[in-house]
């Protein structure tokens, strides 16, 4: 049971970062962006490149990988943002474009790195806790701490930037009228959620072996957790969604079997959309908001 | 010659899949990522019934369509009340659930091992076991389905679908039952996709869950989008292009391990360009309307 709780916390910490990043993106730009899965994979493989291929130290590799990932990813994201503003495409069209971008990214990665599973780093596993009841590696402990800090940062943040972000999410037109520079805020928002996805890519890469399609499943779980948490303005409910999904998944994996994980996660999503469509937050989005 | 017939049969199967998806994605404006799931339901239903019970196509085909139709009906009842983006996520979820069942319910579907030795289609004692005979059969079935879909989309019901894809609220205000139209279109689409599954299973004579993944759904959706969403002829041409693309890449000497990636990259770029083109056309239309209003 203790190992189940620990595993759930580890899973939840990864989903939390993805969920926060997805939530900010979706509330701000109002469409499901599957290209985010590609960005996650880019960051994991960039870290792999610097750690395993160039054999740099982990700290230096992370710093360089953040910069390089942003350099690779920003053109895609700014192009989608420009398309949205210039041509006023609907959310469905942007979703299709994001699928196209994801296909390109996944297959470029597969082309350069092939489809074999890769492990980042060759470090010996260091345990933070290891007893009869549960084990927790040093890296996994770092995940939980990092996710907790990110959660705390988002929940307690009362900076001008976050106030502007919340204002634009609530009402775009009114925020324009009161003089908020939407383009400037948009750019900062893009950097913010990209950094979150880059961080989650690193964590996933350090915890598990990576393949070109790894980003897609994690993004989907992040989306499920966000929908279960609900789309109310604020971040607290996302934590409930993430914890709920992580616990259910680990429970299923432990007692029923890992192979049913994907199916059960989506059945959970469908159940929520049927019986509690606004998630734990119980916040109804007006049709005009969507 | 056999290889060319093989390619034409694949084109026929994917034509059925893409044109059936166009009823939902093109005419009623609901992008669905569950189509490979219905394709898989059709294939597995016919495979299990013909291998385990020796049932003929006259029984397995209607049963496959019925099962697909029931699943599509249930899915659409859940999904149609949601807005656009959530609809896609639900259909994606259904696709994952169907794949999960096909891959993990090993007692029935044999999981990743798949179902081998699926017999060929036999009609009144004639077995369609040669490529030529199967080619004739598949072209005949495509022709029937094309005719049915054409009649459906040009009927009053088809006009309702077109209207709701343009403006759902306005269509509702005209007294049309929008939810019912969406459910019917989704169910018909699922049933037609299962026909493609039946054909595929009996043609290849071996199926496994990897033929019915989310990648397949994305591929079918790509065909519909590249084909222009609502034009059955253009969708057929898009099917020909995308099914023959791997052969074209092999013809220019690309190694097969690279060709697979290149194919997917081309699909992705084609999707982006088609939507970009749509955005350009929308802008041109707006400029033209403004010019007309000023004159």
Image (cartoon, coloured by chain):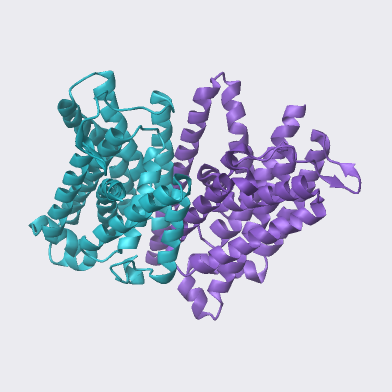
Chain colours: A cyan, B purple
Foreground residue, A103 or A92?
A103
In which image quadrant can residue A102 be found?
A: top left
Image height check: is A282 above or below A89?
below
Residue B266 makes an appearance in the image: yes
Position of B22 with respect to A187 (left or right) is right
Residue furthest left as drawn: A159
Q: Residue at x 39, y 24 (%)?
A: A112
Residue under the point 58% across and 73% down: B180
Of residue A29 and residue B280, the one placed in the foreground of this image is A29
Looking at the image, can residue A88 be seen? no
The answer to whether A71 appears left or right of B52 in the picture is left
Task: Name the residue: 31% across, 49% down.
Answer: A4
* Nearest the eye: B257 or B209: B209
Q: Is residue A151 left or right of residue A49?
A: left
Horizontal and vertical percent position of residue B136: 81, 41
Left or right: A201 as drawn, with respect to A257:
left
In the rendering, at what x and y percent does residue A10 appear? 27, 45
Residue A281 in percent (x, y) is at: 28, 68
Instruction: Name the image quarter holding residue A110.
Output: top left
- Counting from the top left corner in percent of width and height, residue A204 is at 30, 38
């Amino acid at each position: 049971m203790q190992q189940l709780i620990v595993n759930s916390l580890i899973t939840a910490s990864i989903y939390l970062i993805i969920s926060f990043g997805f939530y900010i993106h979706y509330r701000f730009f109002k469409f499901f962006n599957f290209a985010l899965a590609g960005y996650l994979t880019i960051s994991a493989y960039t870290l792999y490149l610097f750690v395993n291929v160039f054999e740099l130290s982990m700290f230096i590799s992370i710093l360089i990988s953040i910069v390089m990932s942003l350099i690779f990813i920003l053109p895609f994201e700014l192009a989608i943002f420009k398309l949205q503003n210039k041509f006023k495409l609907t959310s469905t069209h942007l979703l299709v474009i994001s699928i196209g971008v994801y296909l390109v990214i996944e297959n470029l990665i597969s082309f350069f790195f092939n489809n074999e599973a890769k492990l980042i780093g060759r470090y010996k596993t260091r345990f933070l806790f290891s007893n009869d009841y549960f084990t927790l590696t040093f890296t996994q402990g770092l995940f939980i701490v990092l996710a907790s800090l990110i959660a705390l940062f988002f929940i307690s943040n009362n900076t001008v930037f976050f106030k502007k972000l919340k204002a634009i999410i609530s009402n775009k037109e009114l925020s324009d009228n009161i003089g908020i520079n939407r383009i400037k805020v948009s750019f900062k928002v893009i950097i913010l959620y990209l950094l979150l996805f880059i961080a989650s890519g690193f964590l996933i890469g350090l915890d598990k072996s990576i393949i070109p399609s790894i980003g897609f499943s994690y993004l989907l779980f992040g989306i499920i957790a966000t929908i279960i948490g609900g789309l109310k303005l604020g971040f607290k409910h996302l934590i409930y969604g993430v914890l709920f999904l992580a616990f259910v998944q680990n429970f299923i994996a432990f007692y029923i079997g890992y192979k049913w994980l994907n199916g059960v996660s989506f059945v959970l999503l469908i159940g929520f959309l049927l019986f509690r469509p606004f998630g734990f937050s119980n916040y109804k989005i007006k049709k005009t908001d969507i | 010659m056999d290889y060319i017939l093989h390619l034409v049969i694949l084109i026929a199967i994917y034509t059925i899949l893409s044109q059936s998806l166009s009823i939902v994605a093109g005419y009623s404006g609901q992008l669905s990522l569950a189509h490979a799931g219905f394709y898989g339901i059709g294939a597995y239903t016919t495979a299990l019934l013909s291998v385990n019970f020796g049932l003929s196509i006259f029984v397995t085909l209607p049963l496959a369509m019925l099962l697909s139709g029931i699943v599509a009906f249930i899915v659409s009842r859940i999904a149609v009340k949601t807005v656009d983006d959530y609809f896609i996520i639900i259909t994606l979820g259904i696709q994952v659930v169907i794949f999960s069942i096909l891959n993990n319910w090993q007692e029935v579907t044999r999981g990743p091992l798949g179902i081998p030795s699926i017999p060929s289609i036999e009609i009144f004692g004639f077995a369609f076991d040669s490529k030529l005979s199967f080619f004739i059969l598949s072209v005949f079935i495509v022709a029937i389905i094309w005719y049915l879909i054409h009649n459906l989309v040009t009927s009053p019901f088809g006009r309702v679908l077109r209207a709701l894809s343009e403006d759902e609220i306005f269509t509702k205000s005209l007294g049309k039952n929008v939810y019912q139209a969406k459910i019917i279109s989704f169910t018909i689409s699922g049933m037609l996709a299962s026909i493609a599954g039946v054909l595929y299973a009996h043609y290849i004579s071996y199926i496994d869950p990897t033929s019915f993944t989310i990648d397949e759904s994305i591929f079918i959706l790509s065909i519909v989008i590249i084909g222009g969403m609502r034009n059955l002829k253009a969708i057929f041409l898009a099917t020909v292009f995308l099914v023959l693309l791997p052969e074209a890449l092999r013809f220019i000497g690309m190694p097969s391990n690279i060709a697979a990636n290149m194919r997917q990259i081309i699909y992705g770029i084609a999707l982006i360009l088609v939507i970009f083109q749509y955005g350009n056309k929308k802008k041109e239309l707006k400029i033209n309307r403004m010019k007309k209003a000023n004159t």
